[in-house]
């Protein structure tokens, strides 16, 4: 069993360019003019689908992500520096800062909204500091 | 670069949702679960799906949650190994109180799947894919 996240996007080319600037690669096998398959981590995929194509699966209208949020897609990275690095790249590529960063003993986190308003969280978690905390 | 993918979802009742996904066969990660959140572990890649009480979730996003599943922002796909597993999952979803909005069927000649909404209206599909039959572009 495996899980994929599918997100609707207004402009596939622009979104692909945006996430390329953040350093993500794409799987050619699942990429066409209606959707691209973005590789996240070892072997996970976030599918960016053109809105009309997305709707054929959900049979629902798409939420206006600037007004309501149904999901936060979170990316765990290796250290605190990489959190800021990825966040800075996102802002440079046109993302909007969502909330103030969270800096705690066991966690460092930044949030941004992508070109379509979807919220992404970039975080580092120190599991050892977390268990000491409890 | 990125180590892991996590998914955060708002739910009205954490305990009920925990029970719902448990009935579908998803494992619970006790370590990351608490009073107002539950952590599910999905699939061979151990993707973690965190279910948060709506108020907690809104605290993170500083935004509203789409009303009553009327619109949707995201679709989750669960890939399974066989057509039988698709049928079995559809049955489990129904028994657990989910809503199948697309019955199991063959799709484009190389996939077999169904789609459902969970207790909060979040939308999921369950698919078996035969890549050898996938049309080449």
Image (tube, helix red, strand yellow):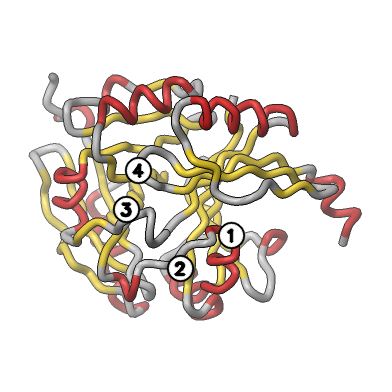
Q: Which residue is mark 3?
A: B75
Label pair 2/1, CB-CB below 8 angstroms = no
Q: Whole-percent x and y of residue A38? A: 39, 29
Q: Which residue is mark 1?
A: B60
Kindly state the secondary structure of the residue where label 3 is placed.
strand
How packed mark 3 is, by other alpha carbons closer than 10 Å (few <14, some 14-19, many 20 or more), is: many
| Disc 4 with disc 3 on a shared chain | no
Q: Is residue B13 above or below residue B47?
A: below
Separation of residues labelled 2 and 4 (CA atoms): 29 Å
- Marks 3 and 1, the one that precedes in the sequence: 1
Circle 4 or circle 3, nearest the eye = 4
Q: Is residue B84 above or below residue B97?
A: above
At 33% from the left and 37% from the top, the residue drawn is A47
Q: Could you say which quadrant of the image residue A128 lies in?
A: top right
- Marks 2 and 3, the one that precedes in the sequence: 2
Kindly state the secondary structure of the residue where label 4 is placed.
loop
At 27% from the left and 47% from the top, the residue drawn is B82
At 44% from the left and 74% from the top, the residue drawn is B20
Q: Which residue is mark 4?
A: A116
Separation of residues labelled 4 and 3 (CA atoms): 15 Å
Q: Which residue is mark 2?
A: B21
Label pair 4/3, CB-CB below 8 angstroms = no
**The numbered mark 4 sits on a residue in which chain?**
A
The quadrant of the picture occupied by the C terminus of chain A is: bottom right
Q: Could you say which quadrant of the image residue A37 lies in?
A: top left
Separation of residues labelled 2 and 3 (CA atoms): 16 Å
């Amino acid at each position: 069993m495996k899980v994929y996240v599918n997100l609707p996007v207004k402009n596939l080319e622009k979104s692909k360019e945006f996430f390329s600037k953040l350093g993500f690669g794409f799987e050619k096998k699942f990429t066409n003019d209606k959707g691209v398959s973005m590789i996240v981590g070892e072997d996970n995929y976030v599918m960016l689908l053109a809105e009309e194509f997305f709707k054929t699966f959900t049979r629902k209208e798409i939420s206006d992500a600037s007004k309501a949020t149904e999901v936060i897609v979170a990316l765990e990275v290796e250290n605190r520096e990489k959190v800021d690095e990825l966040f800075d790249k996102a802002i440079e590529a046109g993302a909007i800062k969502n909330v103030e960063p969270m800096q705690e003993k066991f966690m460092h986190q930044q949030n941004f909204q992508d070109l379509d308003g979807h919220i992404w969280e970039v975080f580092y978690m120190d599991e050892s500091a977390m268990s000491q905390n409890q | 670069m990125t180590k892991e993918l996590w998914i955060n979802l708002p739910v009205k009742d954490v305990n009920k949702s925990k029970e719902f996904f448990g009935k579908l066969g998803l494992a619970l990660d006790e370590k990351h679960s608490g009073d107002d959140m539950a952590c599910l572990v999905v699939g061979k890649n151990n993707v973690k799906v965190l279910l948060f009480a709506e108020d907690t979730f809104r605290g993170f996003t500083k935004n509203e949650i789409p009303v009553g599943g009327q619109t949707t922002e995201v679709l989750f796909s669960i890939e399974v190994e066989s057509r039988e597993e698709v049928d079995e999952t559809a049955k489990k979803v129904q028994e657990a109180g989910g809503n199948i909005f697309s019955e199991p069927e063959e799709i484009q000649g190389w996939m077999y799947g169904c789609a459902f909404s969970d207790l909060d209206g979040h939308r999921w599909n369950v698919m078996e894919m035969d890549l050898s039959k996938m049309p080449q572009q």
